[in-house]
Image (tube, rainbow, N blue to C red):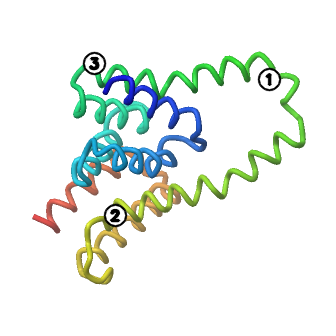
Amino acid sequence: MLWELFLTFFKIGFMSFGGGYAMIPVIGHEVEAHGWLVDEQFTNSVALAGMAPGPIATNTATLIGYETAGVIGATVSTIGIILPSLLIIILIASFFYQMDQNKQVLSIFYGLKPVVTGLIIYAAIHFGFEGQAESLFTWKNVSIAVMAAGVFVAVLKYKLYPLTAILLSGLVGIALFS
């Protein structure tokens, strides 16, 4: 079990680009394939990981490891997901000055931007409307979409501090959905 956790999160850490939010669908697929958590547990783990300090992918891996195999599972999962980044950063840093202005390398990164953006949008839609077989146009879903748009505008245009947005959204969620 521990070796399986390590290898899975090592693979995720090695093959993922675009930060933690882009990794969430990949982590979700692996969790489902291994049967480690049910959907609700995974969604709750991602929500908690997003609110905790630190990278969401690392926090999610830690929580999944903990739920699966306790403290040792959390440790193994965390090492598995951060080790590839550490190794890659060491490797890239050693060649950074040679690659800095390489047009092919810059082109690769520009090509990855739409993929990362698509994965983040997928994750947002998947978690925002998960488990709802009924129509997407319910009052609850419309409320969630309006809240998301409001947070987007408040953070982007009015430079609202993200933690403030999280706290306010939580309060609105209590008021609307309790």
* Residue at x 35% of width, y 52% of height: 165
- Choose mark 3 or mark 1, whichever is in front: 3
Which residue lies at the image location 34% right of the left edge and 20% below the top edge? 75
Indicate the quadrant where residue 174 lies.
Answer: bottom left
Q: Which residue is mark 3?
A: 72
User: In this view of the protein, which residue sits in the foreground, 66 or 7?
Assistant: 7
Provide the residue designation for mark 2: 128
In the figure, is residue 118 to the left or right of 30? right
> Which quadrant of the rendered structure holds the C terminus?
bottom left
Against 53, residue 34 (above or below) is below
Give, as a three-letter code, the residue at label 2.
Gly
Q: Mark 1 or 2 closer to N-term?
A: 1
Between marks 1 and 2, how big is the CA–CA gap?
A: 39 Å
Residue type (three-letter) at the residue carrying disc 1: Phe
Depth check, front residue: 126 or 164: 126
Up-down relation of residue 175 to residue 7 (above or below): below
The residue tagged with tag 2: helix, strand or loop? Answer: helix
Residue 96 is tagged as: 1
Residue 105, position as x, y percentages in the image: 82, 39
Kindly state the secondary structure of the residue where label 1 is placed. Answer: helix
